[in-house]
Every structure is written in C-alpha cells, then in structure tokens.
Amino acid sequence: MNERVEISNSEWEVMRILWTLQAATSRQIIDLLAEKLGWKEATTKTYISRLVTKKYVKTEKRGRAYLYLPAVEEEATITEQLLASFAKICQKHIGQTLANVVREIPLSQADIEEVSRILAAKQKTAPLELECDCLPKGHKAKYC
C-alpha cells in the first residue's frame, strides 16, 4: 500500500488486536475491546467497518462468520505514523523529543542494543547542529 495510512486513535485499538491475533472474528474483537476499554458492541462494529472501508482490514468468509485480517503491515504503519508526527516538529527539537520519548517508554535490552548501534552509526555522519526548518529557507528564526 503506497498511499498514506490514516488511522484514528480508536481504530488503532482494533488494529492492535488484529496485528496481535493476525485474524479475528467480530465477536472476538468486540469481546476484547469491551473488556479492555468498555466499548459497546455497536462502537466496535463501527470501527471495524471503517477500517474495512479504508481497506486497512480485509475480510474472509469462514462458514457463517467473517474473519477480519490486517491489510496493512504493523511495523510499516507504526513507523509511518511516528515519522508523520516528527515531521510536525522543528528538526532542531526532534533530538530532545526523541530523548524524552526514550526516557519514558519501556525498552528491552535488545531494543536498547539496537537503538545504540543505530545511533553510533548515525553519529559518524551527523551534523553538529540542525537548522530550524519552521520557516522557508532564507528567513531567520527569532526563536528556535
């Protein structure tokens, strides 16, 4: 899928279940979201329907029931959403924002090793400082 994936916060909850289970009936999704978030059946069905309409979820007929499957890849979608969020931030502030995020989120030992390796490689070619990209080139920022 080459077009930008746009998933609301509520739709993310449905996608997280589908990515985790790889396939689920509407009953499974409804029951899990009722338990996790207290959602009513109609609410969950609405979000499933929206995701099917957007083609982020596909359906397969299994007997009398439909099985719902993710049609977008989890890692690619997460990365796309995070990069879109970081694109809204002045590039001078991305490093500190990323440091704040890393400080707050849980990471495994393996995660920390991989991030450390990537940062060490990136440090070799990184500039000393990034310029503010809030204004068009040629305009001087008063603050940033």
Image (cartoon, helix red, strand yellow):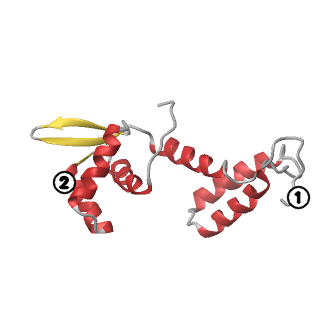
Q: Position of residue 125 (x, y in %)?
A: 84, 43
Residue drawn at point x = 36 percent, y = 52 percent: 20
Q: Is residue 90 above or below residue 65?
A: below
Position of 28 with respect to 21 (left or right) is left
Q: How many marks?
A: 2
Q: Nearer the viewer, mark 1 or mark 2?
A: 1
Q: Nearer the viewer, residue 20 or 111?
A: 20
> At which x and y percent is residue 6?
47, 44
Give the residue drawn at x 38%, y 39%.
56
Q: Which mark is residue 27?
A: 2
Report the side of 133 relative to 39 (left or right). Answer: right
Q: Residue at x 10, y 38 (%)?
A: 63
| Residue nearest the viewer, comparing 8 with 14 | 8
- Could you tell which of marks 1 and 2 lies nearer the N-terminus? 2
Q: Residue 15, how many percent across, how many down?
A: 38, 50
Count neighbours of disc 2 (C-alpha within 10 A) and say few if under 14, some if 14 to 19, many if 20 or more.
Answer: some
The residue that mark 1 highlights is 142
Residue 87 is situated, as x and y percent measured from the top left of the image, at 67, 47
The answer to whether marks 1 and 2 mark residues whose Cβ atoms lie closer than 8 Å is no
Secondary structure category for the residue under label 1: loop
Which amino acid is tagged 2?
Arg
* 51 relative position to 81: left or right: left
Q: Is residue 72 above or below residue 32?
A: above
Q: Residue at x 59, y 62 (%)?
A: 109
Task: Kindly identify the amino acid type of the residue bearing the numbered disc 1.
Answer: Lys
Q: CA distance from mark 1 to mark 2?
A: 56 Å
Q: Nearer the viewer, residue 20 or 93?
A: 93
Residue 56 disc label: none
The quadrant of the picture occupied by the C terminus is bottom right
> Image quadrant of residue 36?
bottom left
- When asked about the image quadrant of residue 22, the answer is top left
